[in-house]
Structure formats: structure tokens, C-alpha cells
Image (cartoon, grey):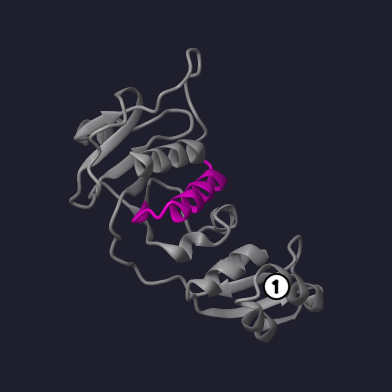
């Protein structure tokens, strides 16, 4: 089970077919009214689920079954290599879902299904395959994103796009396995981007090529 903190994660979980077991809110009527305004397609399901209960700092808290592992979809797949901040993991997943990525893989200790990551993604973990991985990566071309790389051209349409951690960048293991190293163009003196911003710029840049 995973915890959904807030209306947006609950909305997206229901929209993408999650099995939600329970939802509680300090003020269920307010949550239902918000759902009818912001998510009318799932407002009926939310109204049927939500009971009065302690939702802490959130308008609503719910619990859902984590989906079974799914095959990666077509298109580019995002690999987050040892990210440190769960909020950034969630934000990157949110961007990947919006851009139609084939999935998000997380290498390292960060759990992409942690409540903080789910909140950062607004629950869009349910919209595409999201898994933790070890050293065994899927058999796809691996493209490393690094400031010292070549221009963002020639990236295979089914490539795994590897993004390094916020402070230390890509691990030596991932960099060594890369088939191609590419860089986003940046103005002189600018050395890095926020993780989710880098994912967004890369995915949408590739879509426009």
C-alpha cells in the first residue's frame, strides 16, 4: 500500500486506475466540493470513498495498492541515478508523465513510491511504469546527460536518458555504460539545472526535434 497525501495524488490515482482502499478528511464535504470543481471525472469516486477522519496537514489522505511492475512503454525512459531528494524524484516523475515518457527508473536508495515522492508527482506514478532498479538496466540504448557531452542530437527514440544526482551528477558506473553522452545547451557561467527541470528540458527538447 502507498499513502496519497492530498487531493491531486488521489485524483490521479483514481484517474489512472489505482485501487484505492480508504480516504479520510477532516472535512469530507469540502474535499468533495473541491473534487467536483477540480476533478469532476473522479468526483463521484472520491465522494464514495472519503470518510471523516484525521488527515493531518492535508485536505485528504488516502491509501492505494501499488500497481504490479509494468513493462516500459514506447519512447524515452528516464533514469534517475542516485537522486537524493524525494521531492525532486516526484517532480521528475510528474514531468515524465506529462511528456509521455515510457517510464521512470530510479537507481539508488530513493523510493519513488514514498509519500513525499508521490506528493511531488501529484500521484502520477500511476500514469506510467515507475520502479527502482539496480545495476541491471533494460536492454535499451543508454544516453547520459552531462554538461560535458555533445549536443542533444542523434538520441534513439527508445533510449534510456540518465540524469545524475543533484550534487554529484552521474555515477561512474552509469557514465561508463553510456552509449552516448549529451548535454543541454546552457548560457555561459551556468553549470547545472534542477533535476526535474533537466528532465523536462530534455524530454520536451527531444519531442521538438
The answer to whether residue 91 is above or below residue 12 is above
Per the rendered image, the range of residues in magenta is 81-104
List the residue tagged with mark 1.
Answer: 35
| Residue 149 position by quadrant | top left
Please name the residue shown 39% across and 35% down the image: 164
Count up the numbered dots. 1
The answer to whether residue 28 is above or below residue 132 is below
Please name the residue shown 62% across and 82% down the image: 45
Where is residue 32? Give x, y as percent: 74, 77
The magenta stretch spans residue 91: yes
Residue 81 in sight in this render: no
Residue 141 in sight in this render: yes
Where is residue 20? Give x, y as percent: 55, 78
| Residue 41 position by quadrant | bottom right
Q: Quarter holding the C terminus? A: top left
Where is residue 106? Give x, y as percent: 38, 49
- Identity of the residue furthest to the bottom in this view: 48
The magenta stretch spans residue 171: no
Amino acid at each position: 500500500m502507498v499513502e496519497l497525501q492530498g487531493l491531486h495524488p488521489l485524483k490521479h490515482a483514481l484517474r489512472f486506475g489505482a485501487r484505492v482502499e480508504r480516504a479520510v478528511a477532516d472535512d469530507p464535504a469540502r474535499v468533495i466540493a473541491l473534487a467536483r470543481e477540480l476533478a469532476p471525472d473522479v468526483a463521484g469516486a472520491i465522494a464514495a470513498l472519503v470518510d471523516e477522519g484525521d488527515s493531518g496537514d492535508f485536505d485528504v489522505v488516502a491509501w492505494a495498492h501499488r500497481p504490479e511492475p509494468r513493462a516500459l512503454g514506447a519512447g524515452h525512459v528516464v533514469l534517475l541515478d542516485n537522486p537524493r531528494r524525494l521531492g525532486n524524484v516526484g517532480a521528475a516523475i510528474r514531468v515524465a508523465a506529462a511528456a509521455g515518457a515510457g517510464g521512470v527508473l530510479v537507481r539508488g536508495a530513493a523510493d519513488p513510491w514514498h509519500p513525499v515522492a508521490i506528493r511531488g508527482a501529484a500521484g502520477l506514478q500511476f500514469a506510467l511504469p515507475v520502479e527502482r532498479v539496480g545495476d541491471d538496466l533494460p536492454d535499451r540504448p543508454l544516453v547520459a546527460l552531462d554538461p560535458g557531452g555533445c549536443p542533444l542530437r542523434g538520441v534513439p527514440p527508445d533510449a534510456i536518458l540518465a540524469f545524475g544526482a543533484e550534487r554529484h551528477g552521474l555515477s561512474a558506473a552509469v557514465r561508463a555504460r553510456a552509449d552516448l553522452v549529451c548535454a543541454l545547451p546552457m548560457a555561459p557561467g551556468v553549470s547545472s539545472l534542477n533535476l526535474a527541470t533537466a528532465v523536462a528540458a530534455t524530454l520536451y527538447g527531444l519531442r521538438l526535434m
